[in-house]
Image (cartoon, rainbow, N blue to C red):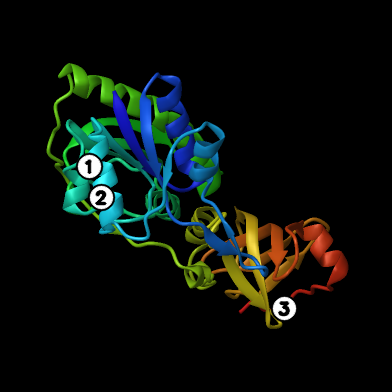
Amino acid sequence: MSVVFFGSPEFAVPSLKSLLDSGEQIAAVVTQTDKPVGRSGEPVPPPVKEFALQHGLKVLQPASMKDEAFLSELEAIKPEFIVVVAYGRILTQRVLDAPTIAPVNLHASLLPRYRGSSPMPWAVINGEAETGLTTMIISIGLDEGDILLQEKHEILPDDTTESLAERMSKAGGPLLVKTLKGLREGTLKPIPQAGESNYVPMLRKDDGRIDWSRPARELYNFIRGMHPWPGAFTFLDGTRIKILRAKRVPGSGEPGVIVKVARDFFEVGTGDGLIEVCELQPEGKKPMFARAFMMGRKLAEGMKLE
């Protein structure tokens, strides 16, 4: 009952925990290398590595999926399954051939919709009412493997990527446990993907820039989808400001122009409707409510966000 688990971010930790709790033998955990963070530049381990070490699991951090020492060690384990949850690297065919039963991936969308590395943010940005989880057989084609199990999840009207990911991550583990059980028992048969597909790109830091000419409905979804990373941002007098929490309200105004300043919020014009800013984060400062921001900086109607 051996499994080699591939994963890196916090999203993958509940899946690894569920596999452990179900009695799966985790022969090794493969995660990305430690990355320098902050001004100090000190290497910080991925959350999956921290969890694995806390539970006495063997951790492998190959710099490449072609590393011969890593490949030899993986093949020597002869795992029944490779389980991949948000690992962050494309696996080679040699890696996919290592398990004796199957390489299995947990993907955070209802495939074939939202293939790619950022399915949850784009589902929120695009205003979807639901998304889901898919377990699949991993193939060389990006997220094109046969489907094993799927589970739908509602996207709530005020969900951010962060809140959606928290719920989905907790649901992913039980779905993986059920998937491995079904494959072992032969009761679960892979089904080729069918229907309309699309690919979504990885989000980059500059993707969060707000275009105030877009309708308020789209900007509300955009702000939620960009939270917590990279964050939806704009500029006020040259200062970069992330908009953390906002509302869509009726009214009209010139795109990017502040049309109302109240005690606890300010409203900004868009291409159609208004955005009410409730919480934000100026560059170099901590997140704060709009009221605190306005106490330290005078805002007036007619000021423009660039």
Q: Earlier in the sequence, mark 3 or mark 2?
A: 2
Q: For the point 52% across and 31% down, which residue is it?
A: 55
Q: What's the amino acid at mark 3?
A: Gly
Q: Nearer the viewer, residue 261 or 284?
A: 284
Asked if the residues shown at circle 3 and circle 1 are in contact, with their CB atoms under 8 angstroms apart, the answer is: no
Element type at mark 1: helix
Amino acid residing under circle 2: Leu
Estimate the x, y position of residue 101 in percent, counting from the top left.
17, 30
Q: Residues within 10 Å of mark 1 (few under 14, many from 20)?
A: some
Q: Earlier in the sequence, mark 3 or mark 1?
A: 1
Give the image location of residue 300, x and y in percent.
Answer: 79, 74
Quadrant of the drawing holding the C terminus = bottom right
Marks 3 and 2 close (CB-CB < 8 Å): no
Query: Compared with residue 20, is residue 270 higher up or lower down, i.e. above or below?
Result: below
Locate residue 266 relative to residue 136 in the image: left or right: right
Query: Mark 3 to mark 2: distance in Å?
Result: 61 Å
Which residue is at the front of the view, 202 or 255? 202
What amino acid is at disc 1? Glu
Residue at the image point whose x is 49% and y is 64% from the top: 215
- Gap between marks 3 and 1 measured at Cα: 65 Å
Are there few (<14), some (14-19), or many (20+) residues within 10 Å of tag 2?
Answer: some
Give the total number of marks visible in the rendering: 3
**In this picture, is 252 found above or below 19?**
below
The residue carrying mark 2 is 71
Residue under the point 43% across and 33% down: 16
Q: Position of residue 305 (x, y in %)?
A: 65, 76
Label 2 secondary element? helix
Residue 289, x across and y down, in percent: 77, 56
Between disc 3 and disc 2, the foreground one is 2
Which dot marks residue 302? Answer: 3
Q: Are marks 1 and 2 in contact (CB under 8 Å)?
A: yes
The residue pinned by badge 1 equals: 75
